[in-house]
Image (tube, helix red, strand yellow):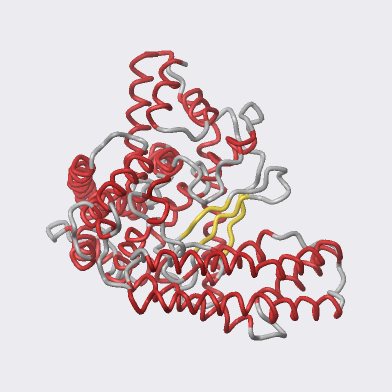
Amino acid sequence: MEAFRINRYALDQLDGFHTGYVLLMTDMAPLSSIQHVELYINRLKASTKKFVMYADKLIVQREAGVFPPKLCLLKVSRSIEGTITNLENESDNMLISVLKEKFKTSTGQDLPDYLRLKAVKAINDFVIPGYTALLKEVKNCVDVADDKAGVWKLPNGEEFYNQCLRMETTTSLTAQQIHDIGMREVESLHSGVQQVIERLNKSGDMLLDGGGSIKSNLQKLNQTEKFFYGNTEEERSCCIKDFQSQLAEISSKVDPMFSVLPQSKCEIKPMPAAMGEGGAGACYWPGSLDLTRPGYFYANLTDMKAQNKAQMRTLTAHEAVPGHHFQISVQLENTKLPYFRRACVDLEGNWFNAYVEGWGLYSERLAKEVGFYATEADGSEGYDLLGHYCAELLRACRLVVDTGMHAFKWDREKAVCYMSDTTDMTRSECENEVDRYCVLPAQACSYKIGQLKLLELREKCKERDGPNFDIKQFHDNVLSIGAVPLETLEELLLKS
């Protein structure tokens, strides 16, 4: 991918230094001593170099005709403007608030005023000017950007996308093959949805219409009040507590299926506001190598309509247990792996996404196998299973839409309409998803391709081992190998 380095967007609405810096300073930086605070202030002062570096990247890419679609850049612009507005509140901006709060929590003392003033000065002299300079270059890009969704428009765009597919799926599957797999998976999942609806109807639950269309029934899931929280702080707190309860439940169900469990704890927290707009419903951030910081499962509570109660269980399985928290923590803690492989999970693309996200989606399926979605009053699978199928539908649609935009030159509107017609998602949710695929070519294909490969490998191991097959051993082997290309994983698993 070195030949295509310039085609990797410097900033986008999902991640980049403009959001990563805030996350680093508010959630990751230790602030339990005067020395820590002094280092924190030094980091504030040192931010200028990074802001300049990313501003320069934007200039170089703009001159080469490389920029995301205009709508995506406008989201970046709004995010930075919101951060600047917050930071200009000297008495209580997010960087000062977390500094005071963490220091008080750790030491039991108020932050000395001289340190607060030093931090405020560093923010005013370095951080705000840095964000302002970055915003200027983002707006310069907006002025020349177009609305084309796919990376086919970039220099050597077709070859670039083929390389993205190879890197993200770690297979030799072509765009056409991936597109076709997606279409087949969508058809299969629609059949599963229909079966659940008919079962609910037979039990006397007539909220959904067994004779209606898949689209109308799925849309009803997003229009029924009982599946959503209110947009209040009290309801946000309730949502976090429900996630915590589900985390405890799934842990008890899947722990017997693993011999090696992570030492690192998993905590559920609201997603920082700077990451909320246009962001995913949730994400996972690994804990530290020395286990002093737990792994964080961030739930996006910016708009509570983004958290459908019927999909929270599948989200918990994917992001936390036995999903990303298990996989990444076990890898971080595996001292048999060389350091560069243990630490190769830094959210900058330095991991094998089909393995990592494939495991996340495999974990959602595993949750079904242990009865995590059997939550109806009679002990059957109903709305929470529908929520799981909706999540799987999204991943299947991604195969179709990602290849559609980047290989077959679909425009944004065609991609949004396909997703809207096929999934439970609202149009605005589909727009956010499609905008994500625009800036992360092929990344969305890794989930389903990775899951299908893991399920295939499990069946191959069953056939090989016969009655001696041990699901715990299979899971331990997959996780102990760590993140590798899927082809390498297959070779190693079938040799073990």
Residue 109: image location, x then y, percent: 87, 71
Viewer-proximal residue among 425 and 53: 53
268 left or right of 172 in image:
right
Question: Residue 245 lies in what quarter of the image?
Answer: bottom right
Q: Residue placed at 49% from the left, 43% from the top?
A: 323
Q: Residue placed at 46% from the left, 62% from the top?
A: 10
Viewer-proximal residue among 339 and 333: 339
Viewer-proximal residue among 11 and 183: 11
Residue 423: image location, x then y, percent: 25, 59
Q: Is residue 486 above or below residue 62?
A: above
Number of numbered markers: 0
336 left or right of 367 in image:
right
Residue 149: image location, x then y, percent: 27, 64
Q: Residue furthest left?
A: 211
335 left or right of 307 in image:
right
Q: Is residue 64 above or below residue 168?
A: below
152 left or right of 225 in image:
left
Viewer-proximal residue among 145 and 246: 145
Residue 334: image location, x then y, percent: 63, 32
Q: Residue placed at 58% from the left, 69% from the top?
A: 51
The reply to whether residue 246 is visible in this rendering is yes
Q: Is residue 319 above or below residue 304?
A: above
Q: Quadrant of the N terminus?
A: top left
The reply to whether residue 206 is visible in this rendering is no
